[in-house]
Amino acid sequence: MGARRDDITNEARMQIAIEILSSNREYGTVTNVAEQYDVSRQTVYDIADKGEQVLLEGLQPGPHGPQVGGNTIDVDLNRLVRGSVVLTEAGVSQRDVCFCLAELLDSEPSLGWVNAQLSKVEETAAEVNQTWQPPVKESMSGDELYSNGQPNLLQVGNDSLYIYELSRQANCEGETWGRLLLDKTNCLQFASDAGTGLAAGVKAADIKIHQLDWDHLLRPLWGQATRLEKQAYTAVEKIQERTLLFDKSTTEKRLQQHLEKWEQLKVKETEQIEMFDAFYRIARSVDDCFALINLESGQLQDSSTCIIKLQALGEQLQSWPEPIYQKLSSNLKNWAPNLFSYQVVLSQALEPLQVHYGSQAIVALCRIWQIEADYKRHPLPLPERQRRQTLWEESLDEAVVLLGEEQLWKAWEKVSQLLGRSWRGSMLAECINSLLRPVLDKRKHTDQGCLELFRFLHNTRPFKRGKRAGHSPAQLVGLRPPDDPLLLLGLKAKCQSNYPGN
């Protein structure tokens, strides 16, 4: 019992171990030390043995150079629940959550336990989402995503990427969408694909500006252009292969056969190249209307001229064979008027800059912005690139003269930020859907609780890159969630890692 006496300090124990372990220890030292501290001789030997173990372990040579200290964690209920939530956020199925926790934390909860804990967290997330009702001060976009045969309806802010609505509904008809959009009637504009249900809902909610999505028009258009280009290259390669076979032939009959095949392939090659060239010109003309700024005038595109142009291009495609061209033709003719709805809001947003910096200076900066934006999207022929480079330099010189260098950069930052916002479609709703789809696919059964948890976590997680980096959607709409958003779900703070010996 003496080895556990509290009145013997660490320093005294260290001195006892040193004296007993010394090779020059005098006869009777053990007895004297036992009498000094009023302990038995066995206790003295126990202290000496313990000191020897500590010295051997502490003085054991380790690896050379600085080393990362080993951390230990306490696996408790809170850590298991937090791990379940984060793994679910990453798209891991409940069954795989059990596997991950067993592998990483050496604790294997049952599938029923994981489902029960997630259900509690989902209920709390729904309550938090309900209390957060920030006013809509930005344009919005919406979309539907089907899972388990039912649509999940999404409304997201185009500037903040804040999810204002994410709910499971029985259908996505106009009445359903209209009911969900009624409290969002003060949004600047609402963008969507060409779905009839969404369009009817926007009309029922009396939202003034409904913007159709350019991406749904341009994506199949340029996709078909790519396919036609590949077909044209394939036709050229077949001509070259047949030419090689012709050169290797030695008999008159074989030469005649290759010549006939070559002539047939040549006709097909000519057709493929002509078809690609014609379609590429149409695609290029449509893409030119996508630009926010007309390079010649430096102003917003003339919507009436662009609408007529797109509908005329749709008429050209009407006579082309294959269903893809009929669909593209229909889209161009029917969507054209609503592809430029954004111009009303964008024009109003540009007015204060024009008043402050002057219309001519803003025209020059808008032209510069559009040239740089086009350069990032598609490669252009060399003569066109040279022409635009000259126009870019002239516009920059004009802006410097009108504003001066100091004011130029301030104006450029504001113009770039304004024109760089999402004006022409619902691509940001599509982006959120691309994050939601893996979560829904990993769950055998999905419900509103799953959507509520996804919405909460998306809105509270800061962006890691891009122009919103370091800010969460909730922060961008004026909310102030804690640094650890899981605290709002009733979970405790993550316990800190402990170093051995602390």
Image (cartoon, rainbow, N blue to C red):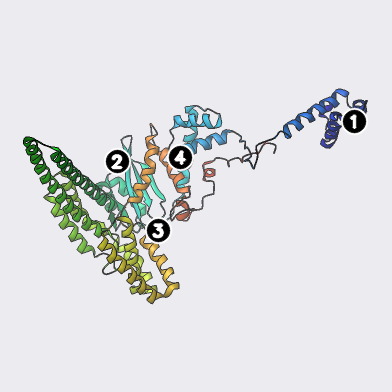
Q: Nearer the viewer, mark 2 or mark 1?
A: 1
Nearer to us of marks 1 and 3 is: 1
Instruction: Tell me the distance, in whole angstroms, between the alpha carbons under discs 3 and 4.
Output: 28 Å
The residue under label 3 is 137
Residue under label 1, please give it.
37
- Decide if residue 354 is in sight here: no
The location of residue 199, given as percent across then percent down, is: 26, 50
Which residue in the rendered view is the most extreme toward the top? Answer: 42
- As helix, strand or loop, the secondary structure at mark 3 comes to loop
> Which secondary structure lies at badge 2?
loop
Q: Determine contact: label 3, label 4, CB under 8 Å.
A: no
Of the numbered discs 3 and 4, the one sitting upstream in the chain is 4
The amino acid sitting under disc 1 is: Tyr
- The residue carrying pointer 3 sits among few (fewer than 14), some (14 to 19) or many (20 or more) residues within 10 Å by Cα, namely few
Calculate the distance from the C-alpha at mark 1 to the C-alpha at mark 3. Answer: 79 Å
* Residue behind mark 4: 89
Residue 171: numbered disc: 2
CB atoms of marks 3 and 2 within 8 Å:
no
- Residue 296: percent from the left, percent from the top? 26, 68
Which label's residue is closer to the chain start, 2 or 1? 1
In contact (CB < 8 Å): disc 1 and disc 4: no
Q: Earlier in the sequence, mark 3 or mark 2?
A: 3
Q: For the residue labelled by badge 4, is the local secondary structure a helix, a strand or a loop?
A: helix
Q: Disc 2 vs disc 1: Cβ atoms closer than 8 Å?
A: no
The amino acid beneath tag 3 is Lys
Q: Please indicate whether residue 55 sits to the left or right of residue 160 in the image.
A: right
Gap in angstroms between the C-alphas marked 4 and 2: 26 Å
What is the three-letter code of the residue carrying label 4? Glu
Q: Residue furthest bottom?
A: 401
- Classed neighbour count for the residue bearing mark 1: other residues with Cα under 10 Å, few (<14), some (14–19), many (≥20): some
Residue name at image x 20 percent, y 51 percent = 331
